[in-house]
Image: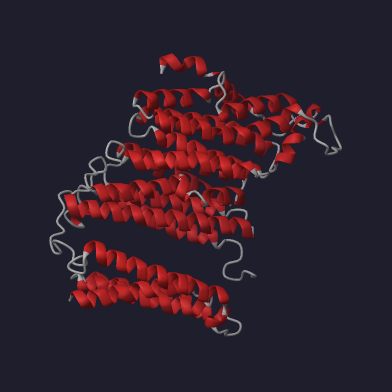
């Protein structure tokens, strides 16, 4: 299990590197998708199947929109490897990543550092699950819903929905 | 931005900061900080200029990163100690991560790069909000965990902030960027006594806010954006220009003015705790910021700039904005030093 974990975490790091260095936007979306997938794999490995599935589905739903948008704004497909900065960054990241991995291996040992201690006892004194939000922690519920409302509101304002809607010239 | 939108956003910014200062649970503090960030973003991107949109994106990304690190630290703390109490951060690693994340929100030195860009990209008054009001929430959280934080990290950040704030402002001609660098330097002073005397840190922050508000209001009412504009400010308001000069000197911390009080108290307290070397370094490095404050002073009041102005008697016409708040705060930012014994 530890080796599978290692592989998944490595794929996650690679996905993040590709995402942060790629000059072509839809490669970035694919990398993001992979990143999300491997993050969810880590969560599954830690025994959180349901939340991993929900996260993946929600992310996938959002990413479909992003993906179609990226493809529609892409003018001509250029080879990502031809861009010089991309190469330099990939080389830099790979070197730094290898050095960092070796350092971590040597300091912590390759043994049990990926396994969380006490995986299944996330019991907290103060929060006993969602039920609290509906009884004595009602203020928390108000704050959370207000936060979601503000999120929606500010997205709408940033997109200046009251002026042009989706018909904005770029 | 219509009235309802403005009301909703300003209410969210105000209330979320107040809720952060009163919350005891990390998740609630996180949620309120997120509300704060999310309602600040449309404020920044309000002019709908590409530069403003860029500033909003930068602000959103850095604040989200800081919030994420904060959430990570709180979760780690909860896993190790089984509670989410803010004042009881017992885990050393998570306290360090939390301190760094909050410093990122406050734009202290290694994480300060976003602040000048964001402040330059927005309008003057939004920049004022970012430099003053937005520092209150992370500052209150830092004060709540101040007895658990690592003194070395705080002092290193403080010295680095003062140095980089001074160095960054040296070659700057844009006023908002300049004041952002000055804000970074002041954040360094605030952070330096956070563990040994949180009350002095609070005092430093409040006096910084008190001094910055009139300067920004002046810049807004005369629509000055570069140092060059300060040279012709006397045509608009000669009295306020001379007062602005003194306010800028107070921001630099010269003795008879209010700005000297926090520096004095901080250096005194650091000497008391035997941090002589650090205190000396901070005092020397603040000379860098003093240099650019002196340059502002020089240009605004001690020389005539070689720019031609079409109308030198503009101050005879009635001003559009009545600078009541600016003048009141300016007097406070200059003359409060004698109040030091009663604090």
Q: Residue at x 18, y 64 (%)?
A: A116
- Residue B250: x %, y % from top left: 58, 26
Task: Please name the colour scheme applied to the rendered image.
Answer: secondary structure
Q: Residue B86 lies in what quarter of the image?
A: top left
Above or below, A38 relative to B313: below
Q: Is residue B202 visible?
A: no
Above or below, A103 relative to B261: below
- Residue B252: x %, y % from top left: 57, 30
Q: Residue at x 33, y 38 (%)?
A: B151
Q: For this rendering, which residue is in front, B25 or B92?
A: B92
Q: Is residue B307 visible?
A: yes
Q: For this rendering, which residue is in front, B112 or A40?
A: B112
Describe residue B65's horizontal placement relative to residue B50 as left or right: left
Describe residue B261's horizontal placement relative to residue B29 as left or right: right
Q: For this rendering, which residue is in front, B319 or A119?
A: A119
Describe residue B331's horizontal placement relative to residue A2 as left or right: right
- Residue A5: x %, y % from top left: 23, 74
- Residue B134: x %, y % from top left: 46, 43
Q: Residue at x 38, y 58 (%)?
A: A148
Above or below, B218 relative to A62: above
Q: Residue A118 lies in what quarter of the image?
A: bottom left
Q: Residue at x 68, y 36 (%)?
A: B221
């Amino acid at each position: 299990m530890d080796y599978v974990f290692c592989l998944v975490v490595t794929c996650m790091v690679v996905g993040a590197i590709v995402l942060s260095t790629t000059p072509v936007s839809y490669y970035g979306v694919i990398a993001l998708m992979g990143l999300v997938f491997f993050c969810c794999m880590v969560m599954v490995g830690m025994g959180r199947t349901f939340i991993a599935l929900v996260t993946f589905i929600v992310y996938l739903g959002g990413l479909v929109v992003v993906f179609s948008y990226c493809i529609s704004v892409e003018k001509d497909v250029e080879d990502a490897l031809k861009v010089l900065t991309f190469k330099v960054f990939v080389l830099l990241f790979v070197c730094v990543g290898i050095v960092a991995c070796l350092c971590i291996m040597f300091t912590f040992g390759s043994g049990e550092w990926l396994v969380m201690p006490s995986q299944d006892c996330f019991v907290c004194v103060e929060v006993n699950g969602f039920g609290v939000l509906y009884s004595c922690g009602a203020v928390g519920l108000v704050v959370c819903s207000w936060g979601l409302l503000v999120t929606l509101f500010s997205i709408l304002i940033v997109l200046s929905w009251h002026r042009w809607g989706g018909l904005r010239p770029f | 931005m219509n009235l309802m939108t403005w009301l909703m956003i300003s209410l969210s910014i105000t209330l979320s900061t107040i809720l952060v200062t009163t919350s005891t649970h990390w998740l609630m503090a996180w949620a309120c900080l997120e509300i704060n960030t999310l309602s600040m973003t449309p404020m920044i991107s309000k002019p709908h200029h590409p530069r403003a949109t860029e500033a909003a994106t930068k602000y959103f990304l850095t604040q989200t990163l800081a919030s994420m690190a904060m959430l990570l630290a709180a979760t780690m703390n909860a896993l190790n100690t089984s509670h989410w109490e803010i004042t009881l951060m017992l885990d050393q690693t998570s306290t360090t991560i939390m301190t760094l994340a909050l410093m990122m929100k406050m734009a202290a030195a290694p994480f300060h790069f976003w602040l000048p860009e964001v402040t330059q990209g927005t309008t003057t008054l939004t920049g004022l909000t970012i430099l003053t009001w937005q520092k209150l929430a992370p500052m209150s959280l830092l004060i709540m965990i101040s007895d658990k934080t690592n003194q070395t990290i705080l002092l290193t950040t403080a010295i680095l902030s003062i140095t980089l704030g001074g160095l960054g402002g040296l070659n700057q001609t844009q006023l908002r960027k300049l004041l952002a660098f000055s804000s970074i330097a002041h954040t360094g002073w605030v952070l330096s006594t956070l563990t040994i005397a949180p009350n002095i840190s609070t005092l430093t922050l409040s006096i910084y806010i008190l001094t910055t508000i009139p300067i920004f209001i002046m810049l807004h009412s005369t629509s000055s954006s570069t140092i060059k504009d300060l040279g012709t400010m006397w045509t608009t308001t000669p009295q306020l220009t001379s007062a602005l000069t003194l306010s800028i000197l107070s921001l630099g911390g010269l003795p008879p003015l209010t700005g000297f009080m926090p520096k004095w108290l901080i250096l005194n307290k650091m000497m008391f705790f035997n941090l002589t070397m650090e205190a000396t370094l901070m005092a020397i490095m603040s000379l860098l910021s003093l240099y650019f404050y002196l340059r502002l002073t020089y240009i605004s009041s001690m020389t005539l700039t070689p720019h031609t102005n079409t109308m030198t008697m503009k101050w005879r016409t009635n001003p559009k904005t009545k600078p009541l708040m600016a003048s009141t705060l300016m007097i406070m930012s200059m003359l409060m030093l004698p109040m030091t014994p009663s604090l």
